Amino acid sequence: MLRDRLTFRAKLAAAFTALFFCAGAALLIFVTVLARQGTMEQFASITTDYAGGPTDPRPTSSASSGPAAPTSPGPAGPTSPDPAGSPGLRQKAEDARLARVEVTNRLQKTAVRQMVVWSAVGLAVMAVLSGAMGWWLAGRALRPVREVILAARRMSEENLHERLQLEGPQDELRELGDTYDTMLDRLEKSFTSQRRFVANASHELRTPLAAQRTSIEVGLADPLPAHLIPVREDLLITNREAEHLIAALLLLARSDRGLDETKDTDLAELTRQAADELSSLAAEHTVSTAVHTTPLSVNGDPVLLKHLASNLVRNAIQYNHPRGTVTVRIDDARRLTVTNTGPRVDPTRVDGLFEPFRRLDRDRTAVHGHGLGLSIVRSIATAHGGTVTAAPGPAGGLRVEVRLPTTR
């Protein structure tokens, strides 16, 4: 229905217009009825005045009058006709009265018709003007709501400190703005507490893990019975994975806090360095890596940007087939794209890969990876004002594209 497709502002303006039109139409009907009744009475009185008066204008004798004039004797002659009693004259008087009544009725109808026509034209013009005025008034009334909407669209983890601080009387709109600011206060405190907890927990866990690794290496040093050698290796691998997880959590917490200092950095150079450093991992997984880059200057944190490229390349190597390929490209469109030839990816699960601790494997005890690689990539890209998108490859694997604000 059309009503369902109209915006609230349009509905409000339409309500103003309909209210004015109905009130104007009721007033027009009321005035027309009263004017018609009044003109009928006025014209009736005018008609009576014109058609009234004595109908027999013959002179009458009076007792106080003098003696009658003597009449000449002799036979009476023929009497003159009485003008007032002539049927022809009475008919003419009646026709004149009817003509005046007809003219009066026509004048009345014409006056009422002209009043209705011009009143209807004025009502239509005023309805249009009231609609435009209603649209303007609705816009002014909804301006605070618009500010709340724009603020909600801008809201993210990086700008939770922004507040509306609406001014004006303490009405419903002011209360809406204050409620929104209070909600942002609670969200900011919650996010700050979460980030602080992750950072503090990661720092606190690094020390006992380092001490644990040292104890394993010293307590289980050679010479060692043959049956304890695999145990030592498993303990060291587990310890190393835990340290990598803690380092990843610290990096995620740091990127979530935003950028402290930035400088112009060549993302292409950082990407080539990351690919070179992971060449041994690629050889271990029998994966070939191809890097095609053009200079791409980005204003950001070099350490975080290198971690972004490193995580993308590492994920593409780890989640790949033996003898697969990884293609890293920075093209003329000024975007970083990493594509691999890994297993097929369900398109419905692509967005979930950017969540912490999500892997392609459904089992959380997967041998490699902690499920934080793409989460860190997205966090770093967001901190730099960029975006990350991913899509399954036609023959399998994943294509991840990063767009960052660049400097020329």
Image: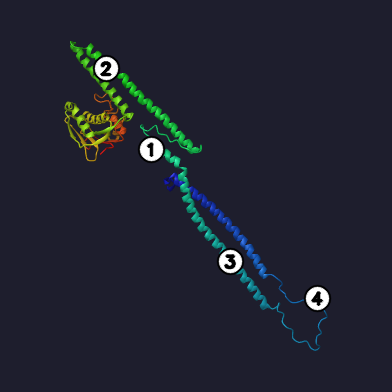
Label 2, label 4: how far apart the Cα atoms are: 148 Å
As helix, strand or loop, the secondary structure at mark 4 comes to: loop
Query: Are circles 4 and 1 on residues that touch, CB within 8 Å?
Result: no
* Of callouts 4 and 1, the N-terminal one: 4
Query: Are circles 3 and 1 on residues that touch, CB within 8 Å?
Result: no
Left or right: 128, with 81 as reference point:
left
Residue under label 4, please give it: 62
- The location of residue 379, given as percent across then percent down, is 31, 31
Q: Residue at x 56, y 56 (%)?
A: 29
Disc 4 crowd rating (10 Å Cα; few below 14, some 14-19, many 20+) is few
Label 4, label 1: how far apart the Cα atoms are: 106 Å
* Of callouts 3 and 2, the N-terminal one: 3
Residue under label 2, please give it: 210
- The location of residue 150, given as percent across then percent down, is 40, 39
Disc 3 crowd rating (10 Å Cα; few below 14, some 14-19, many 20+) is some
Label 1, label 2: how far apart the Cα atoms are: 44 Å
